[in-house]
Image (cartoon, grey):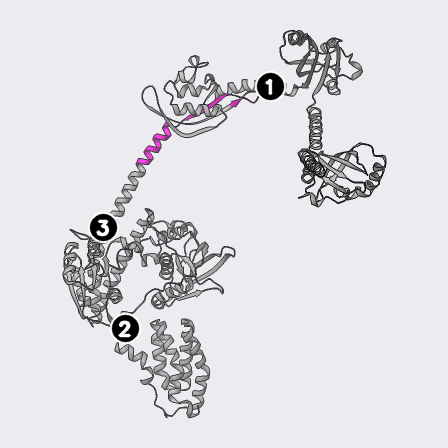
Amino acid sequence: MINSNLVFEKQLKQNAHLFRLFLDTLTDAILLVDQSGKIVQLNRQTILMFGYESKKELIGKAVEILLPNQFKNAHQTHRSIFFEDAESQSLSNLFGKRKDSTTFPVEVNLAPLPLEKNTIFSVCIQDLSKYREAEEKLHQVTERLMLATQAANIGIWDWDIINNVLVWDNAMYALYGISENQFTGVYEAWEAGLHPEDKERSREEVQEALLEGKEFNTEFRVVWPDTSVHYIKAIAKIYYDTQGNAVRMVGTNWDITPLKIADKQIVENANRNKVFVEQAPSAIAMFDKQMRYLTISKQWLKDYQLKEENIIGRSHYEVFPGTKEELKAIYQECLQGAVNRRDEDGFERADGSIQWIKWEIRPWYNLDNQIGGILMFTEDISTRKQTEAELRRAKQLAEDANKAKSEFLTNMSHEIRTPMNAILGFSEVLYNTISDPIAKGHLETILTSGNTLLNLINDLLDLSKIESGRVEINPEAVNLPQLINDLQQLFATETAKKSLYLNIKVPMGFPQSLMMDKVRLKQILINLIGNAIKFTDAGGVTVQLALENFNRKQLLYGISIQVKDTGIGISPEYHKKIFESFWQVRTVLTKKNKGTGLGLAITKRLVELMGGNIHLQSALGRGCSFTLHFEDLPTSDEPIKQDASFDWNDKKVKFFHSKVLIVDDFPINQKLIKTYLKQYDLQLHVAENGVEAVKKASQVIPDIILMDLLMPEMNGEEALEVLRAQEITQTIPVIAFTASTSVNNPEKMLSKFDGILRKPTTRAELLRQLTRFLPNEIQMQNSVAESQTTALEHNIPKQGMEVNRTHLEALLSQFSQRSEALAEIVSLDDVSLFIEELSDFCTQHQLDYMTEYIRQLNNRYQEFDIHGISQQLTYFTPWVEEIFPKDSGL
């Protein structure tokens, strides 16, 4: 008995397991709910449908957990009633609630399941989301179709062929211009509205569709009661019975009158276009899709030497059998909708000559907006091509001539600079060795004239380089106010000789570091300031900087530099001419101050190469104002390179038995360098060409080599390559010693050589290069050192000499602080005023012991020695206190 019970229990468990597996295979959610409304069992689909993770989350919970909140109370009431009636029910228009609180439409089937002791209830839930979505889409499509037919004014009709009943919708009445009560609803009523010329054809097309099964797709005209004619497009579908007899015909009509009118206009336009094409002054041809000629212009016939009667209807490939495959491919692209053009193309004529044409090919479209063929537009440019070829030849000749000119100028520069090196060099040596004032004057004239000639050569070379496009702009960080202050000192002697002022005006906040080409900018300003001084006899020159705009976002500045003088001025009619090469205004003053007429031409072109522009304001007798404008200049955080300046006339240099190799094929240049260096402790060796230089350098191992560039047998650059390749000579510094114009590209030269020494050179330039590489000791000359280091020991009144203390106190009170301030920032105008007032004060109060101080300060002022002025000003208070020390009670 016990075994039987065990077998029975096992069978029950197995059946329950199979039942749960069965439930889990169903696609609907299945729940078992007891009479208290709690869930006692559910299948896997319930978990998936309602978004839960396991059955445990729902078993034992009230079934209302699966309902939206707004339905829970009402559902509890309905559930109680259902449990009492215990009858199966199917409920729709209900909603379920997922775990994430989202809702969805459901259909629910309820059924009681009676057990021995009680009844439980089966709940089957079907998710209707997809069905509702499909219904909504169908509804939307139906609405859109209805709206489309209404918007397009499409009429729908239905003809019962057996009973001859024709049903129209409202749009059909509007299409035929009648009202519903004017239509009898039979086939003959439709036929009666047709245009008389279209009735027979339309009747035949209906019969062919009914009897032969042909597609009913036609057009016809209808005549409205007001006699107006309208074009109708008709399409229909035929339905048959089981014996194959036509029993029903359903179709649509719509008004195509506007299209027909447009079609008529297109035909008219086509005819006009045909006439236009034929009469067009350009070469035009129209082709169909098979590339057959439809129409052509007279110019086409003329350009391609064709006859019209032999063209129309023929294939383009037949007319031009040598058409390239590339062009055939282009034609096919255009027949697919592409537009192709070419500015120039050449093809061979029958006589073998080459014809150059410019062409464009595009498709043309028919009434159905389908491509009907292509249009070709061509222009014979053979004459233009011939002209261009001639221009190219002329341009090449001009470039060759320009190149020859540049080469000539380069060679002439070298040939002139080489003897000028000797002339200026030995003139400088003589000037510093003789004392006869008359001879010194003659030598000064030679030096001045020689430098003038060099400036002329430089101007010619600059102009040549600009014209040939060989000038490179190399921006670097530039302190523009400092640069102009340096130029003020450069021109100090010239302005002093003519008693002119040279004022510098820099506004507050002007940037201290701008990226510009410093070399070219300095060249521009020297030219403008030099011209201003040259052509001004009274008054002076003002250089004014201005900040015109500032882009804060990109940190870019717009600036202007104005050079304004009080000179002779220029008449407005010459304002453009003065920027032309070799042109000057002819006046008395220009005859006195002769020039080449190249300066302003070079200036203008350099300004433009730097991205700026130059503007002139002037009138005759009212001075000139040249203004440079530069935009979008960036700033720089890089340290600004300072120009190396060293007055070798005030220095004594001591070398320590170093060896110098001078390589130059011109004996005079060798002699000049030897003359410059004969007073120093240096071993001087000479070579006349590159081959000899390499040999001698390998023998004597010099400490530095001065290398000419243009030499026979082996030039300087070739010799440098050999020296760098030899281990024994590869580290010897080599200075390019040259008259060649290649030094105008210093970056390129310095990538090879260690320095550049340009012919003609000076003793100072030579020493500057040598002291860079050779061991040396630089000392102040005795006379200068004495004046700068022991100024307080000479010509100063001895302590205790009798002076008026009141006057001395007044002297310190009025001038001590001013001298200290001027020593910090030297202003020549303020120094001049200081000297004048100090001199007047000392003369008035008979302070003779200040005479020597004033003389020394004035000497430095007259020499424009900014450093010396500053030093002398710092001596003022010590000078006075040397007479009366502080402990003396002053």
Front of the two marks 1 and 3 = 1
Distance of label 1 from label 2 (alpha carbons): 101 Å
Q: Give the amino acid at mark 1.
A: Asp
The amino acid sitting under disc 2 is: Asp
Q: From the image, which quarter does the C terminus lie in?
A: bottom left
Numbered label attached to residue 263: 1
| Residue 307 x, y percent position in the rendering | 41, 15
Residue on which the image places disc 2:
650
Does the magenta-highlighted stretch encompass residue 390?
Answer: yes
Taking the view exactly as shown, the residue that stands out farthest to the front is 1
- 374 relative position to 458: left or right: right
The mark closer to the camera, 1 or 2, is: 1
Q: Which residue is mark 3?
A: 411
Q: In this image, 285 relative to 596: left or right?
A: right
Task: Determine contact: label 1, label 3, CB under 8 Å.
Answer: no
Q: Earlier in the sequence, mark 1 or mark 2?
A: 1
Amino acid found under the numbered disc labelled 3: Asn
- Residue at image location 34% in from the left, 19% down from the top: 350
Residue 823 within the magenta-colored segment of the rendering: no
Q: Residue visible at 48% across and 59% down?
A: 547
Query: Is residue 844 shown above or below 403?
Result: below
The answer to whether residue 618 is seen in the rendering is no
Give the residue at x 35% y 33%.
388
Q: Earlier in the sequence, mark 1 or mark 3?
A: 1
User: Across the whole image, how many numbered discs are drawn on residues?
Assistant: 3
The residue at the point 40 percent across, 18 percent down is 317
Number of other residues with Cα within 10 Å of mark 1, as a class: few under 14, some 14 to 19, many 20 or more: some
Magenta segment boundaries in residue numbering:
364-393
Compared with residue 195, is residue 825 higher up or lower down, i.e. above or below? Answer: below
Residue 21 in the image: x percent, y percent? 67, 35
How far apart, in angstroms, are the residues tagged by discs 3 and 2? 37 Å
